[in-house]
Image: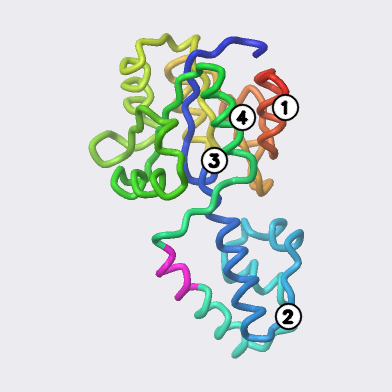
Amino acid sequence: MSKRYRLVVFDWEGTISDTLGQIIDYVASEAKRLNFGELNPEIARENVNLGLVKATKKVFPHLSTQQMEELLEAVQSKLYTRHAEVYLIPGVFDLIRRLSEEGVFLAIATNKGQQSLHKALQSTGLEKYFIVTKSAGSLPSKPHPEMLKEILQDFGVTASETLMIGDSPTDMEMAKSLQVDVIGVDFYHQHPELLEQSGALAVFDDYQLVADFLQLPQKD
């Protein structure tokens, strides 16, 4: 690594968990089931920041009002029953594994509930990599620094030995308030400039680029 971090702290939603990718997949599968046409993934990703309704209209402009309502209702119904499903950002599992193999401590700081986070870690096979997780509920929500402060204390590492990775300005603000290095990830090109303005050392849209930034050994 260019700088030898002893601890890397991840956000969850949008950093490890690919919630937006999951929604796009649901729109694609339901549109196909209803014979409304094939979804163009590139157009979907370009418009996902508009919200479900507006983005779906951009992807399927040919649908009638009734068809659009039918599609949205089907997608929302599927979202309500998605509890057991967790999509991961492409490449994140491999990055986490490689960091662990290098002896780097790993933790999660998230505004997601602790119980649902625990279930998600179990279902994805990531539980074994994260010794410490902190979440909102028992602790103040980000950007309040308490979660990150407790993580540093739990591992006995300093701020200068720690890197935060997140997709939200609140992640950047939390890290900077403790003088912790932070990088942003923006897989849907929603607000890279906001992450930079909030203190990100760099912003990436691919986890291989994060691995390169950290100068991890090349995979066999």
Give the Cα distance between marks 4 and 2. 40 Å
Marker disc for residue 15? 3
Task: Residue 137 in the image: state x and y as whole percent.
Answer: 26, 41
Question: Callout 1 environment at 10 Å: few (<14), some (14 to 19), or many (20+)?
Answer: few
Within-10-Å neighbours for mark 4: few <14, some 14–19, many 20+? few
Residue at 32%, 46% (x, y): give it.
Answer: 113
Q: Which residue is mark 4?
A: 197
Q: Which mark is residue 25?
A: none
* Helix, strand or loop under label 3: loop
Amino acid at pointer 2: Gly
Does the magenta segment cover residue 83? no
Q: Are marks 2 and 1 in contact (CB under 8 Å)?
A: no
Q: Nearer the viewer, mark 1 or mark 3?
A: 1
User: What separation in Å lies between label 1 and label 4 (alpha carbons)?
Assistant: 37 Å
For marks 3 and 4, the one nearer the N-term is: 3
How far across and how far down the image is residue 194, in percent? Answer: 61, 36
The residue beneath circle 2 is: 37
Q: Main secondary structure of the magenta part?
A: helix
Label 1 to label 3: alpha-carbon separation: 25 Å
The figure's colour scheme reads rainbow
Q: Quadrant of residue 129?
A: top left
- Upstream in sequence: badge 1 or badge 3: 3
Q: Which mark is residue 220?
A: 1
Q: Are marks 2 and 3 in contact (CB under 8 Å)?
A: no
Q: Earlier in the sequence, mark 2 or mark 1?
A: 2
Q: Which residues are magenta?
A: 76-82
Using the image as rendered, state which of residue 43 and residue 10 is in the foreground: 10
